[in-house]
Image (spheres, grey):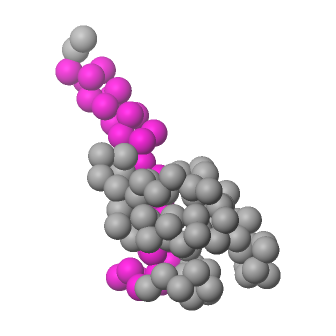
Amino acid sequence: MNTSVRKGLLGAAALFLSVSVAIPGAASAGMKMAAHKAVGSARVKAIQAALDKAGAHLKVDGFAGRQTSAALRAYQKKHHLKVTGTADAATLKSLKVK
């Protein structure tokens, strides 16, 4: 396999394996921080643990994927918060995650 094809495949795999989660308090409002499959985020783990405690039945692994986003949306809807699927300030406050 030539080098350019290999680099293209690696880039596509990295893109596929990464997801974004809004992290309040980041350098600027609305800034998104990538959580890659190679390293689970402690912040995402805290959010997942709080959602799990609230009844979401999530695997607490630190990877913000479709299940975490769906659990956030369900929690937000149930608690009459703006349904975004991201861990915004109001959701974090409601979950008691700092």
Residue name at image x 50 percent, y 77 percent: 30
- Whether 69 is drawn above or below 75: the answer is above
Residue name at image x 42 percent, y 42 percent: 17
**Who is closer to the viewer here, 3 or 98?**
98
Residue 51: which quarter of the image?
Answer: bottom right
**Who is closer to the viewer here, 7 or 58?**
58
- Residue 60, x across and y down, in percent: 46, 57
- Residue 43, x across and y down, in percent: 39, 70
Residue 54: which quarter of the image?
Answer: bottom right
Residue 31: which quarter of the image?
Answer: bottom left
- Residue 42, x across and y down, in percent: 35, 67
- Residue 28, x across and y down, in percent: 41, 83
Instruction: Based on the picture, tell me whether residue 58 belongs to the magenta stretch.
Output: no
- Whether 58 is drawn above or below 53: the answer is above
Quadrant where the N terminus is found in the figure: top left
**Who is closer to the viewer here, 73 or 16?**
73
Q: What segment is highlighted magenta in the picture?
A: 3-31
Residue at the extreme top: 1
Quadrant where the C terminus is found in the figure: bottom left
Does residue 61 appear in this view? yes
- Whether 2 is drawn above or below 29: the answer is above
Does residue 35 appear in this view? no
Instruction: Based on the picture, tell me whether residue 30 belongs to the magenta stretch.
Output: yes
- Whether 41 is drawn above or below 77: the answer is above
- Residue 94 is left or right of residue 60, and the answer is right
Residue name at image x 30 percent, y 46 percent: 38
Residue name at image x 61 percent, y 52 percent: 67
- Residue 78 is left or right of residue 18, and the answer is right
